[in-house]
Amino acid sequence: MSDMSSLPVAVIGAGPVGLAAAAHLIERGLTPLVLERGAQAGAAMAEWSHVRLFSPWRYSVDEAARRLLEASGWRAPAADGVPTGGEIVARYLAPLAALPALAPHIRFGAAVTAISRAGIDKQTTAGREAAPFVIRWRDAAGKERQAQAQAVIDASGTWTRPNPMGTDGLPVPGEGAAADRIAYGIPDVLGAERAAYAGKRVLVVGSGHSAINAALDLLKLQESAPGGRVLWALRRNSLEKLFGGGLNDQLPERGALGLAAKAAIDAGRLELLAPFAASEIDGTGQALRVSGTLEGRPVTLEVDRVIVATGFRPALEMLGELRIALDPAVEATPLLAPLIDPNLHSCGSVRPHGARELAHPDSGFYIAGAKSYGRAPTFLMLTGYEQVRSITAAIAGDHQAAAEVRLVLPETGVCSAPPASAGEASAAACCGPAPAVKAEPVKAEAASCCGPKTKAERALETA
């Protein structure tokens, strides 16, 4: 096998998880090559800079990144403060990316287009392990470039791939044509995009915290710009899961969102449509005519704008020449998928995982951060930080550190899994009120969440 130790480790994405990976690599004496498609660190996060996170600062800063920053004189924000996306970028990611230890290794305006093995296509097995990775990207001037790497950590996130409005995973007919009046995620309705939403009829589609955020921002806008109407369409009738853990949620900001949404519905300020399935959008007139079914009956809504907050999915096109293994439904690795599948549970806690669960058939390639969760929600930055700590240890050959578990996540107070049968650990038991988050490392079994391991997990472990 050829010696690839002199090559860098490619990190795709300079968001919180990507820069954390770079910090851990530097601490281990490895050279990162960070490729960021945006013009700055945290470029995707900057696009939702107005949104306040659920996690306080204590959960928002990676420990290796903290050590590098503090060595330069940086002072951490107050641990209990809850930052916005913009504050994370300005007070944490930008200073981190500017450090002399990191800055020379970051390429901004680098849009990765493909990853492969040098001189070997996807079908070739002979010599595969000995071949370095080849990463191709387009720079800010549009010129195609490439570099070799001993390993790759894909922390590119899912921000560029929002889910469409259709319940079948596809855009509804007319969705593309009406794109100028449809926003995805959480638009800045109280700031930069205020004029587009003030006094307007707005349909919010989605059943997660992003949808709650958008709906509550619209209600706040009504206080200074009356005359608007806010309709909130849930594609599934799952109110208990939607409202979160409330007072049982160990992340107060997350629990408060659910409580505020429930209060707005009870007061009649927020019109709830559930379950609602859109079938077509007609944008040929002044109003958008959204046709579909509400509780199984045909309905047509006339609105001025639509906000689609139905989550995100990973972009996998650039991985077409790699041997990767993904669950067919969740699009996470087969070992991680059962822990995060929203069809099984919606716990805030996930059984701790690292390099082992995130490995792919092409040795040395890992997906970390939000993209590692595929189409599953509930990802927290703290999870990504633990992922890259373990991954970088594995790349450095420190398999003992890679196998350790150093993470306990705060609970949501809600779990959608059915109660376990007698004699089994209850899925709900891990997702209800939990003790305070511990700082010390814990073993995986002690922190395991949501009941016993599935048959799929056990089969993969013994394969």
Image (cartoon, rainbow, N blue to C red):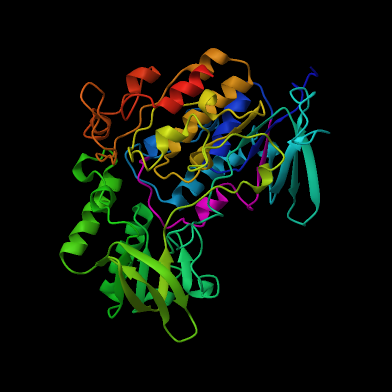
Q: Is residue 247 left or right of residue 302?
A: left
What percent of the width, then of the height, locates residue 368? 54, 36
What percent of the width, then of the height, locates residue 74? 49, 35
Quadrant (top left/top right/bottom left/bottom right) for the N terminus: top right
Secondary structure mostly taken by the magenta-highlighted segment of the chain: loop
Residue 38 counted in the magenta span: yes
Quadrant (top left/top right/bottom left/bottom right) for the C terminus: top right
Query: Can residue 441 be seen at all in this image of the molecule?
Result: no
Q: Is residue 156 left or right of residue 192?
A: right
Please tell me which residue lies in front, 349 or 93: 349
What percent of the width, then of the height, locates residue 201? 34, 77
Please tell me which residue lies in front, 169 or 317: 169
Please tell me which residue lies in front, 46 or 153: 153
Query: Most extreme residue toward the left, as rendered?
Result: 267
Q: Residue at x 48, y 42 (%)?
A: 330
For the record, the magenta segment spans 32-56
Q: Residue at x 37, y 65 (%)?
A: 277
Q: Residue at x 30, y 77 (%)?
A: 228
The image quarter containing residue 415 is top left
Q: Relative to 325, say whether 312 is above or below.
A: below
Q: Relative to 351, say whether 103 is above or below.
A: below
The image quarter containing residue 320 is top right
The image quarter containing residue 5 is top right
